[in-house]
Amino acid sequence: MSNKVNAVIAGVGMYVPETVLDNKYFETIVETTDEWILSRTGIKERRRLDTGATSDLATGALLDLMKSTGLKPEEIDIIIVCTITPDMFFPSTACLVQDNVKAVNAWGFDLSAACSGFLFGLQTGASFIETGRYKKVVVIGADKMSSITDYTDRNTCILFGDAASAVLLEATEDLSIGLQDTILHCDGSGRESLYIKAGGSLNPPTRETVDNNMHKLYQDGKAVYKVAVTGMANVSYEIMQKHNLTADDIAYLVPHQANLRIINATAEKANLPKEKVMINIDRYGNTTAATIPLCLAEFYKAGKLKKGDKLILAAFGAGYTWGSAYLVWGID
Ligand code: UT7
């Protein structure tokens, strides 16, 4: 008898901070316009956490998940926090979240894969579930992007927002639901197109690195756009082909929310109409590891997801890192 199990998303939670920065606000701090931002990116507003850190966002998302599912802290086996804005280099943000919710039986760690963080985390969490040894794994995408955003750089400051979202992974013997497959990649030759120049072991912090503004996110937008637009479209198409899925089979494409034009190109390649694409970039901007689970949480809470829905998740980000996942929704 086979005892193979799939990892299924058994609950979702989300947390977005209250402060809203709309495009008009950016008109007051850099040379830009609402029209430019909206037409080039699809973003209207994004959120900022005024006090606190990524662990506070992540904890908020986990508490929301616990409230909506009845999950007790002591039941959690593993906490994976996908983030590029940890509270500190160490200890991990996962340790801080563990303490905040008193998940006394959990272990955990942070996972750094930038905008692909949630996809990498989902596959990692699912692998733990598939071993049969762990029953409840929490995967959180959380980023306080405002902590690494240079608000004097109009090329990047308009893009990012703060948010967190969490999913609970459990085992199911019903192999028709849950995580079916992922295709994941990284290519470090893209390291200098999107990164923070200093602060790590390559360029430890000095007075000079601070003076030269090397602790904030740098992006060569055009270079990243070029590879992201084909990378995300191709990897979404590839996983659909691999599983003989057509646009008719898919309930939703769940794309990383970096730029509406990249999202549209991905949907177009997969032949998916607008109604089948999860989009919330207009309200939150690019929240890095949080974008995909935030879409899932919002759509589920709004009653737009039902058991059996076939989803294609896709992301592209710093590293480069990119990938797609084929997931069948498992909650009624
Ligand atoms: O999530 C991780 C992965 N990241 C991505 O996927 C992001 C990929 N890149 C992009 O989404 C786009 O490249 C951006 C949204 C970042 C930029 O859009 P773009 O259409 O590629 O603009 P551009 O960088 O080619 O800039 C066009 C012009 C430039 O002026 P010149 O050189 O043509 O005179 C920029 O200086 O737009 C200018 N510009 C702005 N103008 C008004 C750049 N930022 C702004 C701004 N407001 N905020």
Image (spheres, rainbow, N blue to C red):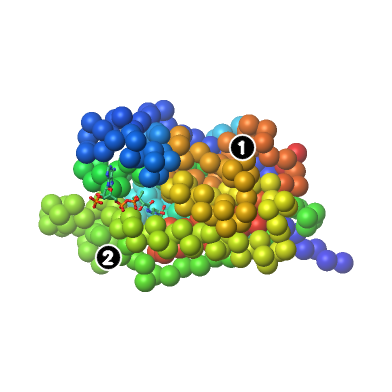
Residue 183 location (% of width, % of height): 58, 65
Residue 287 location (% of width, % of height): 43, 44
Q: Which mark is residue 201?
A: 2
Left or right placement of residue 187 versus residue 327 in this view: left
Amino acid tagged 2:
Ser
Residue 250 location (% of width, % of height): 69, 51
Residue beneath disc 1: 299
Residue that appears at 40% across and 34% down: 44
Q: Which mark is residue 87?
A: none
Nearest the eye: 313 or 332: 313
Residue that appears at 27% across and 65% down: 201
Characterize the local packing of mark 2: few (<14), some (14-19) or many (20 or more) Cα atoms within 10 angstroms. Answer: few
Nearest the eye: 132 or 287: 287
| Displayed quadrant of residue 154 | top left
Under circle 2, the secondary element is loop
Characterize the local packing of mark 1: few (<14), some (14-19) or many (20 or more) Cα atoms within 10 angstroms. Answer: some
Disc on the earlier residue, 1 or 2: 2
Left or right placement of residue 123 versus residue 319 in this view: right
| Displayed quadrant of residue 332 | top right
- For residue 51, above or below residue 205: above
Image depth: mark 1 or mark 2 in front = 1
Q: Quadrant of the N terminus?
A: bottom right
